[in-house]
Image (cartoon, rainbow, N blue to C red):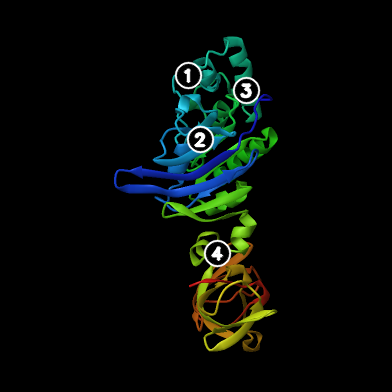
């Protein structure tokens, strides 16, 4: 794996049409060498089409695609220095694990001894050194996925592509395997493009996330930026849980933004924007609930409570509408039917366009 040189990826005004359907609308993006960038979004947003365009499995209708600075727009998949890890693993059931990992090398006419050595090194990187002689059906789902990763990285690609790689695994195993994929990517310094619809997965593995909606980019940035500074109600709701509350921006000045929520005025740190209708983004963990009515500006009624060990999830109905709140578990949790006060720190609120 030492010969692998991470490549950059660039799209310049790329459009992809399938007949009358536009799957991508003039997409421009740049991925730096050594980064793991996730394409995130709901079904049909264009993320998988983008990945297939990088791989050369689809051809751009307009625009240009560059990998490692080379224009590959019309270059077939065979000649692109990329490897893909598929959702279905795509392992050959009649081959051993070692033969599966070495397969791509043998197709490229790498000498048998070298192919075996590189395959063994790949298995070592994914923690499966002792599994080379087994066949895929003798492995767990997580182990099969690691074999698929090893098969991709032994080809020493400039860019590693991962298409929903964890969707066939259960929740606990997904967390474990995504940590391994991230560790391998960082250890080898690979450029990786990762496709998922799972927000938590994207936030856990990514240097940068590109959120797509309706065949175009809705917002891009680090996981922290997208969570803390969403540019729309769609991003606020899609990246983590959020309560979106209608409000009116009354005034903007050099030190504060004054808003009205349910006939009450609140001052927030100054934010770019304009006066008029907007939505206040209130994250579940920012909400503080109390039986003491003097502790909050607003009131609500507990309609649902779920004890989850170290947390309690609450649903409320009240002045601010329906809310979802998360509190640390206590010895005296709130109960369904209780009337409570609702408070939050205005300094941590965000506003997005209505």
Q: Which mark is residue 95?
A: 1
> How far is disc 4 from disc 1 in space, using C-alphas?
49 Å
In the displayed structure image, the side of residue 21 where residue 56 appears, left or right:
right
Q: Quadrant of residue 142?
A: top right
The disc, 1 or 3, on the residue closer to the chain's N-terminal end is 1
The disc, 2 or 3, on the residue closer to the chain's N-terminal end is 3
Q: Element at badge 1?
A: loop
The disc, 1 or 2, on the residue closer to the chain's N-terminal end is 1
Is residue 271 positioned above or below 65 on the image? below
Percent position of residue 183, x then y: 66, 39
> How far is disc 3 from disc 4 in space, using C-alphas?
48 Å
What residue is pinned by disc 2?
Answer: 141
Q: Nearer the viewer, mark 3 or mark 4?
A: 4
> How far is disc 4 from disc 2 in space, using C-alphas?
38 Å
Instruction: Classify 10 Å Cα crowding around label 3: few (below 14), some (14-19), many (20 and above).
Output: few
**CB atoms of marks 4 and 2 within 8 Å:** no
Q: Which mark is residue 130?
A: 3
Percent position of residue 149, x then y: 56, 31
> How far is disc 1 from disc 3 in space, using C-alphas?
16 Å
Q: How many marks?
A: 4
Q: Element at badge 4?
A: loop
């Amino acid at each position: 794996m030492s010969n692998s040189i991470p490549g950059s990826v660039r799209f310049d005004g790329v459009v992809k049409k399938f007949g009358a359907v536009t799957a991508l609308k003039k997409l421009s993006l740049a991925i730096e060498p050594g980064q793991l960038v996730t394409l995130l979004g709901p079904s049909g947003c264009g993320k998988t089409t983008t990945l297939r365009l990088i791989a050369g499995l689809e051809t751009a209708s307009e625009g240009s695609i560059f990998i490692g600075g080379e224009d590959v727009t019309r270059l077939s998949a065979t000649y692109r220095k990329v490897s893909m890890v598929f959702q279905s693993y795509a392992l050959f059931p009649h081959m051993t694990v070692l033969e599966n990992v070495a397969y791509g090398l043998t197709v490229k006419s790498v000498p048998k001894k070298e192919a075996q050595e590189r395959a063994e090194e790949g298995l070592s990187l994914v923690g499966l050194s002792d599994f080379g002689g087994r066949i895929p059906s003798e492995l767990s789902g997580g182990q099969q996925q690691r074999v698929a990763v090893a098969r991709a990285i032994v080809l020493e690609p400039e860019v590693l592509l991962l298409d929903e790689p964890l969707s066939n695994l259960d929740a606990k195993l997904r967390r474990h395997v995504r940590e391994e994929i991230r560790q391998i990517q960082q250890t080898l310094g690979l450029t990786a493009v990762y496709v998922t619809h799972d927000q938590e997965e994207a936030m856990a593995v990514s240097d940068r996330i590109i959120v797509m909606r309706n065949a175009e980019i809705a917002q891009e940035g680090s996981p922290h930026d997208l969570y803390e500074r969403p540019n729309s109600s769609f991003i606020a709701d899609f990246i983590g849980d959020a309560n979106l509350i209608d409000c009116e921006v009354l005034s903007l000045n050099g030190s504060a933004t004054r808003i009205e929520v349910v006939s009450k005025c609140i001052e927030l740190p100054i934010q770019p924007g304009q006066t008029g209708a907007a939505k206040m983004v209130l994250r579940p963990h920012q909400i503080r609930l109390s039986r003491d009515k003097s502790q909050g500006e607003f009131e609500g009624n507990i309609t649902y409570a779920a004890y989850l060990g170290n947390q309690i999830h609450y649903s409320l109905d009240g002045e601010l509408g329906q809310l979802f709140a998360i509190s640390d578990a206590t010895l005296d949790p709130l109960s369904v039917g209780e009337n409570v006060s609702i408070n939050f720190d205005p300094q941590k609120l965000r506003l997005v366009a209505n």
